[in-house]
Amino acid sequence: MHATLPLLTPTRSRFPAVRRGAVTTLQVNVGYRCNQTCLHCHVNAGPTRTEAMSRETADQVLAYLAATGATTLDLTGGAPELNPEFRHLVLGARARGAKVIDRCNLTVLFEPGQEDLAGFLAEHQVQVVASLPCYTEELVDRQRGKGVYEKSIRAIRALNALGYGREGSGLELNLVYNPQGPSLPPAQEKLEIEYKRVLGEAFGVVFNRLLTIANMPIQRFGSTLVSKGQFNDYMELLRGAHRTENLETVMCRSLVSVDWQGYLYDCDFNQMLGLPLRVAGRARTHIGEILREDLSGNPVVVRDHCFGCTAGQGSSCGGALA
């Protein structure tokens, strides 16, 4: 795999300086094991990965959640549900009054041992943010693997049967779109209308919102760009589409990213590049070292991949910024 960090202008990044505000979201990568191997994956997750968060680190995450007063615990992976501590984190966060987001690939609902997963998520009112990078079978299977589309539709139906995506249920189901290649996502609101029309007419399924997320030029997707000779062109596309107003709402202002070992980063993308959150006097900071420390005003570590968050309508784990 081609390393992209050396290509992201570490000493002369053109990206503007950003400083943190108050922490409202703790995004936790519980490990890289996944039942899928997707072409656009910025984590390089897959079935052979063994990294997994321990119970000790999970408890430190819950302690930090309480100490910061963060209102949201956002669980990701890999397939986060495959980590044995996933349900412990959900229960602990809900007991503390925090909202929980599960970044779900949908097909994990059919993995051995996950037969009761959908019911567990509904019982504890976990918001499901589910990957479905297109509404057509051909493009989903091309990006995520043969048979993924059919399983994904079955999973959405199972979630709908529990109330997910239905008005008044309190169970939120959002889908995620990623471009197929080195291009920016289309307008989020218009694409959401098309997703709802096609999926509703073809399968009778419903969901709340569509989140459009730009592909980051790192890990598996970045390496593919390098192999195809498209990396520099994609970076110029992102830089050229930068919108200064998006800097006000980039997720790194209010989110802290935690890796499976408990180390802190400004975002999940920096985590995958090995760029730790900057705290004075530390090369990197563990979640157990910072319970009482206020990160407001800290500079965010930036490189040119950050243009992926400010290009065009903007991109974050919550979808478009504009």
Image: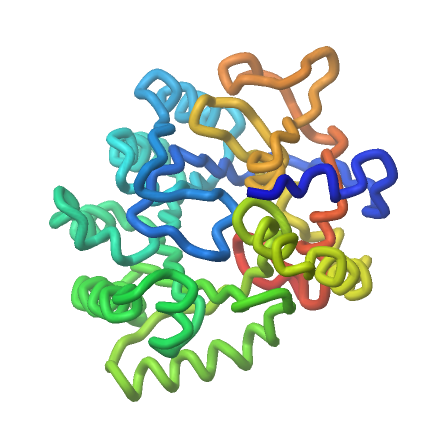
Colouring of the image:
rainbow
The answer to whether 29 appears left or right of 108 in the picture is right
Residue located 74% across and 43% down the image: 7
The answer to whether 43 appears left or right of 321 in the picture is left
Residue located 83% across and 42% down the image: 13
Give the x, y percent position of residue 82. Answer: 26, 39
Give the x, y percent position of residue 46. Answer: 36, 44
Residue located 64% across and 51% down the image: 217
Where is residue 255, by image quadrant?
top right
Residue located 39% across and 50% down the image: 103
Q: Vertical placement of 187 versus 294: above or below?
A: below
Where is residue 128, by image quadrant?
bottom left
**Depth check: 133 or 223 in front?**
223
Q: Quadrant of the N terminus?
A: top right
Give the x, y percent position of residue 2. Answer: 61, 43
**Depth check: 279 or 271 in front?**
271
Q: Vertical placement of 244 versus 208: above or below?
A: above
Q: Vertical placement of 282 versus 305: above or below?
A: above
